[in-house]
Image (cartoon, rainbow, N blue to C red):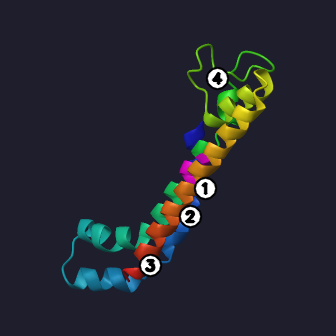
Amino acid sequence: MVDWRWVGYNALIYLAAMQSISKDMYEAAALDGASRRRQFWSITIPQLRPTIIFTLIVSTIGGLQLFTEPLMFTSGAGAISGGSEGQFQTITMYLLDVMNTRFRWGYAGAVALVLFLLIALVSLVNYLLARRISSDK
């Protein structure tokens, strides 16, 4: 279910990115004798690298914030423990469980801060990679 949530979003982004690649590059590569496989690895993938990094980071952030889909598998109203043994509990479900069920507000604040720091760290890595890729041109 989560995979299908991101497929359409990422497909549109990749479609737009692939349409922005100049056809002249492929024509020049074909004239130079490059096979379709070589064109893919030497033209398409390098041109899509910023898009790949963007979708990877945005999907990772979305995965860290995952809440609704696992909640649909719970057995009753108010049950946010993530299954009988917590087998499908996510970070956000754990945060809500600590906050609303166990009433440990300080610990829940610490969990929220760690989640924020994880998202900030992933975003920083994204920024550094994107800056490195753009400077390689």
Question: What residue is shown with label 3?
Answer: 134
How far apart marks 4 and 2 lie (CA) works out to 32 Å
Mark found first going from the N terminus, 2 or 3: 2
Q: Nearer the viewer, mark 4 or mark 2?
A: 4
Was residue 61 drawn as part of the magenta stretch in this picture?
A: yes
Was residue 79 drawn as part of the magenta stretch in this picture?
A: no
Q: Nearer the viewer, mark 4 or mark 1?
A: 4
Question: What residue is shown with label 4?
Answer: 82
Amino acid identity at mark 3: Ser
Res 23 quadrant in image: bottom left
Coordinates of residue 127 in the picture (x, y in percent): 52, 68
Which residue appears farthest toward the left when viewing the image?
A: 33
**SS of the residue at dot 3?**
helix
Question: What residue is shown with label 2?
Answer: 13
Amino acid identity at mark 2: Ile
Determine contact: label 4, label 2, CB under 8 Å: no
How far apart marks 1 and 3 lie (CA) works out to 24 Å
Q: Quadrant of the N terminus?
A: top right
Question: What residue is shown with label 1?
Answer: 9
Residue at x 26%, y 81% (from the top left corner)? 29
**SS of the residue at dot 4?**
loop
